Image (cartoon, helix red, strand yellow):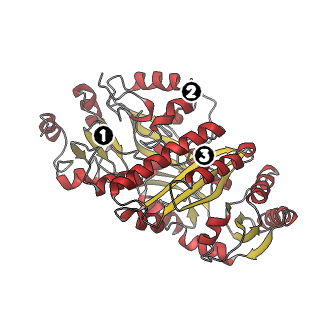
Amino acid sequence: MKDWIDDLNNLLPKGRVSVSQEDILDHSHDAWSVSIKTRQQGKDDFFPDVIVYPQSEKEVSTLLAWASESKVPVTPWGAGSAVTGAPLPLTGGVSLDMSRMNKILNLDQKNLTVTVQAGIMGDKLENYLSERGLTLNHSPQSIDSSTAGGWVSTRSTGQFSSRYGGIEELLLGIKAVIPSGEIVEIKPAIRASMGPDLKEIFLGAEGTMGVITQVTFKIFAVSENQIYEAISFDTVLEGIETMRKIMQIGLRPSLIRFYDEDESRHVTKNDSFSGCIMFLGFEGISLVSSAEYQTAIGFCKEAGGLLLGRELVQDWMLRRFDYSTIEKIVSKPAGVAETVEVAHFWTGIYATYYELKKTLAEHVDEVLGHFSHAYPQGTSLYMILLSGTNREKSPAEAEETLRNIWKTTHKITSMTGAMAAHHHGVGIARMPIIVKELGTGMTILQLIKKAIDPSNVLCPGKLGFSASKK
């Protein structure tokens, strides 16, 4: 046992520090398919020496001030549901589990804001709001296994982002503890012309700049009218072009998802389904949402789209948080399943889709693709990779295949100019490409890191930073 663990036990209240092997193992792997494979092999490549469960900002402050002085690495942990290795410690030290800081602190129904501690689970927050006729309208697939702080740290987005935006557009204020132990607050504001938006220092920083302890979000009244429709298209290009027209004319669909032919058979649960399928949804005031719906359907019909009704979308809405297909396959020793999300402008998204579809097919049995999280300028692309024939014979072979999938993806996005990540973040999976992705902007990031964390104790080695102690 490390000598400094005794110091930590004396520093914090009783029950905050754990060195149990079960806790350490649980904090050595997340939901990244590669991490699941290493766990199946009994390989703990990234394990902490100790787990700390703070219950207040003061305790986080005390820990970080001590860690900076003692040169002990600290890696924040939300719920461990990241699919990129984001919460895994590269250099040991402390895994800072925020799960006990999980309270709803304030609900302002007139200004439509809610303030919560960073460790609150997404489904708990949404259920609390729903009981009061409200909603956050942030619905990542991992809502029941992810935290508010994790959303902000990884710059997440949800299934209704085309209308309500990603977490960065829902975030109004933030409190965090920086490595010196100082508690900093960027107070909630609807907008402020007071220099740079300092929330951005912590948004998407994956714990490298500070430990997020509290956030304030926008919230919304539940819409009075919701309209859904499924539309089939003959080709991927027809669907992408229709998405572009819908977004660029100024419509704001709450739901717009377009599936290629292979994934359409999965989403309809119909192996004989032919063609591609789009899910559309509009909500809000009845007159406005109905007008938006009719306009969007006009574009679909012009492109040869065939209306299939709302039942397929309603069925998907009931199971949209279901991740079991991936989980069941990966849980098998030789099972290979992975998800990769990228993004591009409209001019480059089809070429990116085509190259990924063709090249990734060399590694797995099925490559499924859908386009979602659309913007006037472009869209994200989500690839689901599945192997059901057990071409791999062991967890080690499956791990190798998964690592090759990531190498291939990075090569293709670099070639086509696509953004290498849309909403799953960097973690370990995208470490090889982040410096190239950020380009000369990495200089600014490194300067900020050096100023905020001169001892390099927060997540050393992550986000393209050095892993060495200062």
Image spot of residue 441 (x, y percent):
56, 26
Q: Which mark is residue 448?
A: none
Looking at the picture, which amino acid does disc 3 mark? Glu
Image spot of residue 142 (x, y percent):
47, 59
Q: Which mark is residue 439?
A: 2
Up-down: is 64 above or below 142? above
Looking at marks 2 and 3 on the same chain, the residue that comes earlier in the sequence is marked by 3
Q: Which residue is mark 3?
A: 169
Up-down: is 169 above or below 319? above
Q: Which residue is mark 1?
A: 60
Up-down: is 128 above or below 308? above
How many numbered marks are there?
3
Callout 3: helix, strand or loop?
A: helix
Residue count near mark 3 (Cα–Cα under 10 Å), binned few <14, some 14–19, many ≥20? few
Residue count near mark 2 (Cα–Cα under 10 Å), binned few <14, some 14–19, many ≥20? few
- Residue at screen point 63% across, 66% down: 262
Residue count near mark 1 (Cα–Cα under 10 Å), binned few <14, some 14–19, many ≥20? many
Q: Is residue 85 left or right of residue 258?
A: left
Looking at the picture, which amino acid does disc 1 mark? Val
Q: CA distance from mark 1 to mark 2?
A: 33 Å
- Residue at screen point 56% across, 23% down: 440
Q: Is residue 383 left or right of residue 371?
A: left
